[in-house]
Amino acid sequence: MKKRIYLASPHMSGREMDFVQEAFDTNWIAPLGKNVDLFEKEIAQRVDRKYAAALVSGTAAIHLGLKWLGVGQGDLVFCSSLTFSGSCNSVMYEKAIPVFIDSEYESWNISPAALEKAFEWAKKNNKMPKAVITVNLYGQACDYDAVCEICDRHHTPILEDAAESLGAKYKNRPTGSFGKLSALSFNGNKIITTSGGGMLLSNDENAIKKAKFWATQARDNAPHYLHSELGYNYRLSNVSAGIGRGQLTALEERVAQKKAIYDRYKEAFKDIDDIEMMPVPKWSQPNFWLSCMTLKEKSRLSPMDIINKLAENNVEARPIWKPMHTQPYYSDYEFFTSKNDGELSIGEDIFNRGLCLPSDTKMTTEELDYVIGLVKELF
Ligand SMILES: *Cc1c(COP(=O)(O)O)cnc(C)c1O
């Protein structure tokens, strides 16, 4: 059996152990320590934010971000539907009500037209959302000029879920710098990893101070253990942060490698009429975290035909995220689309016709060509 080819797996730079060793040598095997402080500083600098809190996951970052925005029981939160459940699960942790927004074809991200519809509905019902969660899917920014204009006009803050998009830009501005707050993930499959981790970022010092307070069990300033608020154990360990610092030194290189993978797929499939690669709008400079494609409607093949063929040859590919409004757990919540009643939503259409191709930066050129060959054999 050939060596397995992965969708996206951890890729060490070789510098991680130096930072981890330092944590061991100084016995800072704890949440907090020099690596945590510097990792926060280095990431904040990278995405043009003033303040950052390193946390155990991207989900924890979104959770504390929503809490800072005052999201609580019965509040509405708008969220892009075509995403991973980590984007919206925190809405449920706070017993708030998610309202899902469809995508646009141009970027696969939140549709300004659908978002506007949702705001009109909210206004009519006299209940505005407390926050809008935007997602930068597969490492591509949403159309922030349009989305920010709408949210500003309706006085609703944005929480940017940049879990998949570290290193990507929107009109030369780094993702992770949009909205009142933004969340990053360093889960094992993301472009850089701490083996599990996340970060909440903001230019509001109080937001990050409060997030750190909640993340360390909400201990009040007293010699004994005094709690006037509910706390969480959400801080990233100093060992994990060491891995993150080593990983961050390779971010630029990883983005270039991911782009090269996408470009090679695009070139290889340009003569296959059935295949379209995920579009990249003019304003977008993705990190190409995952190279995704769709099959044209008329294709005799389905995404699962390609995924299965690759799986038979020990190559990992995946379907597109299944839109949240079609998930059994979330199916009762409101959903807004720019499409007409009775028409298939854009998110469902992309899900039905799309898949994520192997985008592992450890793939050799030969392995990538092998994957391309397997896909081409089907046509
Ligand atoms: C990975 C991911 C998250 C959650 O991050 P974790 O670190 O796994 O908790 C949230 N949103 C999106 C879009 C993600 O891809």
Image: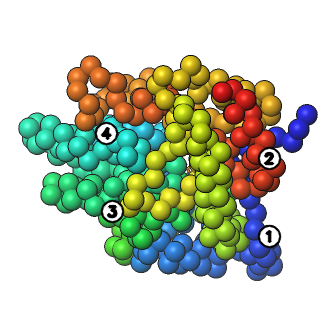
Nearest to the eye among marks 2 and 4: give it. 2
- Within 10 Å of disc 3 (Cα), the crowding (few <14, some 14-19, many 20+) is many
The residue at which mark 2 appears reads as 367
Looking at the rendered structure, the secondary structure element under dot 3 is loop
Looking at the rendered structure, the secondary structure element under dot 2 is helix
The residue at which mark 1 appears reads as 14
Looking at the rendered structure, the secondary structure element under dot 4 is strand
Q: Nearer the viewer, residue 143 or 179?
A: 143
Residue drawn where x is 69% and y is 26% of the image = 378
Q: Position of residue 261 (x, y in %)?
A: 66, 53
Ligand 1 is within 8 Å of the C-beta of the residue at disc 1: no
The residue at which mark 3 appears reads as 179
Residue at the farthest front position: 271
Q: Compared to 250, does 346 lie above or below?
A: above
Kind of residue at disc 1: Gly
Nearest to the eye among marks 1 and 2: give it. 2
Label 3, label 1: how many angstroms apart (C-alpha)? Answer: 34 Å
The residue at which mark 4 appears reads as 101
Whether residue 156 appears in this view of the structure is: no
Residue drawn where x is 49% and y is 68% of the image = 53
Number of labels in the image equals: 4
Label 1, label 4: how many angstroms apart (C-alpha)? Answer: 41 Å
Looking at the rendered structure, the secondary structure element under dot 1 is loop
Ligand 1 is within 8 Å of the C-beta of the residue at disc 4: no
